[in-house]
């Protein structure tokens, strides 16, 4: 079911209405209903027909400014556990754990790499580039690109001037998402699952793999301290 999103006008109306109802609930006339418009100490008498008429007219006039339904049903949709938009276990408005926070994950990945391989290794620019190149080549291999086509692409790229690193990162991301959509793969889900997988394995596993690559001249050796037994 699609629910119309509350507009800024709707939200402002709901805030004004909340203030009116709060004043009445506390036993005071809403400020907008008083003669001078700034006296917060005028008592509201629920048994006084005049007070009730003034308050009700103010409530109706305020409701006509926007749509309270869009505000209420929109929030109801957000907090519905089935929507998986908000964390049902949090007392504050917080994103559902299943939703991606890629900026946080990006930092966590490098922190994990620094702790696993040693900062001198994991935060070395050349090492990071080699690991990215390795994984990207493994992807195109898995997707069926032959080695000669890859070599042809490499020759084509290196015949051109080097691009801007930040822009190239963006282009890598865009092309990866396009490929993933074409293949019917949710890239963000796979990225999250892979980080969970690699971070659950013991550091000894990764140290052995890193140093095996280093022995072949394909990586820097690990500079992390060997785990104590």
Image (cartoon, rainbow, N blue to C red):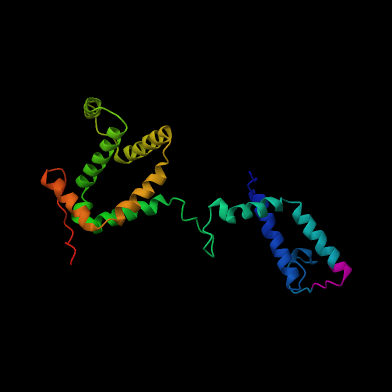
Residue 142 belongs to the span the image colors magenta: no
Q: Position of residue 57 (x, y in %)?
A: 82, 59
Which picture quadrant has residue 112?
Answer: bottom left
Name the magenta segment's main secondary structure. Answer: loop
Residue 46 belongs to the span the image colors magenta: yes
> Vertically, is 172 above or below 210?
above
Nearer to me, 78 or 208: 208
The residue sitting at 71% across, 53% down in the picture is 68
Q: Which residues are magenta?
A: 44-51
Which picture quadrant has residue 229?
Answer: bottom left
Nearer to me, 164 or 111: 111
> Vertically, is 11 above or below 2?
below
Nearer to me, 169 or 197: 197
Q: Is residue 39 visible?
A: no
Q: Position of residue 42 (x, y in %)?
A: 78, 73
Q: Quadrant of the N terminus?
A: top right
The residue sitting at 56% across, 55% down in the picture is 81
């Amino acid at each position: 079911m699609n629910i119309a999103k509350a507009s800024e006008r709707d939200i402002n109306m709901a805030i004004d209405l909340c203030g009116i109802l709060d004043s009445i609930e506390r036993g005071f006339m809403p400020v907008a209903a008083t003669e001078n418009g700034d006296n917060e100490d005028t008592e509201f008498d629920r048994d006084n027909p005049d007070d009730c008429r003034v308050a009700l007219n103010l409530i109706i006039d305020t409701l006509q400014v926007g749509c309270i339904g869009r505000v209420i049903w929109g929030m109801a949709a957000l907090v519905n556990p089935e929507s998986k938009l908000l964390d049902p276990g949090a007392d504050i408005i917080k994103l559902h754990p299943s939703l991606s926070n890629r900026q946080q994950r990006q930092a966590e990945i490098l922190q994990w790499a620094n702790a696993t391989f040693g900062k001198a290794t994991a935060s070395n620019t050349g090492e990071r580039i080699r690991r990215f190149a390795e994984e990207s080549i493994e992807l195109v291999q898995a997707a069926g690109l032959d080695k000669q086509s890859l070599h042809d692409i490499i020759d084509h790229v290196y015949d051109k001037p080097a691009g801007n690193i930040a822009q190239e990162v963006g282009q890598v991301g865009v092309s990866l998402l396009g490929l993933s959509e074409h293949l019917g793969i949710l890239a963000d889900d796979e990225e999250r699952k892979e980080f969970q997988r690699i971070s659950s394995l013991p550091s000894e596993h990764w140290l052995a793999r890193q140093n095996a690559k280093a022995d072949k001249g394909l990586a820097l050796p690990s500079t992390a301290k060997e785990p104590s037994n």
